[in-house]
Amino acid sequence: MSHYDVGELVRSIVIDTLDIPAALYRTDLVFSADLGLESLDLLDIFFRIECSAPVVLTVEKCGRYLQGDVPDAEFCDARGIISGRGLNRLSTVMPQLDTARWAGRLTLDRMLSELSIANLVSMVENLLAEGQAAAHA
Amino acid sequence: MPEHGDAVLRVGSYSVDAAAVDQLIARHGTEALRLPATGSPAVRWALRQATLRALAAPPRIAARWGDIALRGDGEGPWTLLFKGEVAPYARSVLHGDIALTVTTRAGRVTAHAVLTRAATPPAPRETEVPR
């Protein structure tokens, strides 16, 4: 069990990075649609989290976390549309995704836009636990 | 497949505010974007991101923009060199060329990477892709 309150850490960093009023903050906010976040902002948030918690939050780790064990060639097609297997994986780390709605329609470009703050909190918690397990192994 | 010209397979586009890139580097250091110190970081960042989009790179590969080397000055032309884990992925999806263009307007850098399939049979696959 981590002694870091990841939810609070992410909250303070997101509010500060995106310069949004604290009262508007909700974990179900979706980065792109609700917060106007660009990929560079996400990088900024990652770096800030890394500076504040003992977690290595690289974009590579984020990519592996999102893709899981789905092979590169099976995650999406040549047009960048995420496959059924890829969508199933994403639904485990982005449970708000409606797989029926997005089947055959969710593109790679759109995927990150659908990431929510709750998804980011889960990812950080997961990577933090991973790091702690490795340290104790 | 026409015998003349190349067939456009996919276009990857990426747009970024140059000032935002500069701010990120100022805040987190030059290593933040894992880009070489030469040239405009916003242009080099945007070109790599557009290339990864054109390749329809899955998340694991898309996160490895540091595996893409870009030769050329700020005005282009550029040559892409795929390394590391991006190289085998690029070999598997790339059967032609990638043409790169960049425009800058009102401080915003927009890069386009156009993935084409050569009309002639491809040469033995190489990771270096001259544009």
Image (cartoon, rainbow, N blue to C red):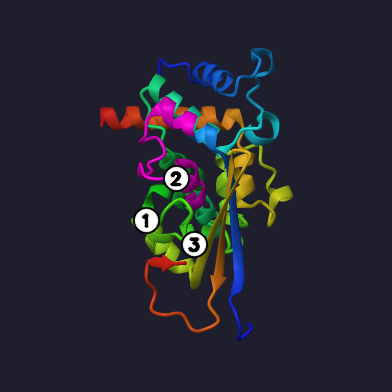
B49 up-or-down from A126: above or below:
below
Mark 3 is on which residue type?
A: Ala
Question: Is A75 left, or right, of B35 in this rendering?
Answer: right
Which mark is in front, 1 or 3? 1
Residue A18 in picture, x, y percent from top left: 59, 24
Mark 1 is on which residue type?
A: Glu
Give the residue displayed 64% in from the left and 46% down from the top.
A110
Foreground residue, B70 or A99? B70
| Res A28 → quadrant | top right
Foreground residue, B118 or A106? B118
Is residue B29 rendered magenta in the image? Answer: yes
Is residue B125 rendered magenta in the image? Answer: no
Residue B26 in picture, x, y percent from top left: 42, 27
Residue A100 in picture, x, y percent from top left: 72, 50
Residue at which label 1 appears: B85
Discs 2 and 3 carry the same chain letter: yes
Residue at which label 3 appears: A73
Discs 2 and 1 carry the same chain letter: no
Question: Is A78 left, or right, of A126 in this rendering?
Answer: right
Disc 2 on helix, strand or loop? helix
Point out the stretch of residues depicted in magenta. Answer: B22-48
Mark 2 is on which residue type?
A: Arg
Give the spatial CA distance, label 1 vs label 3.
13 Å
Residue at which label 2 appears: A64
- Circle nearer the N terminus (2, 3): 2
Disc 3 on helix, strand or loop? helix
Q: Is residue B57 visible?
A: no
Disc 1 on helix, strand or loop? loop
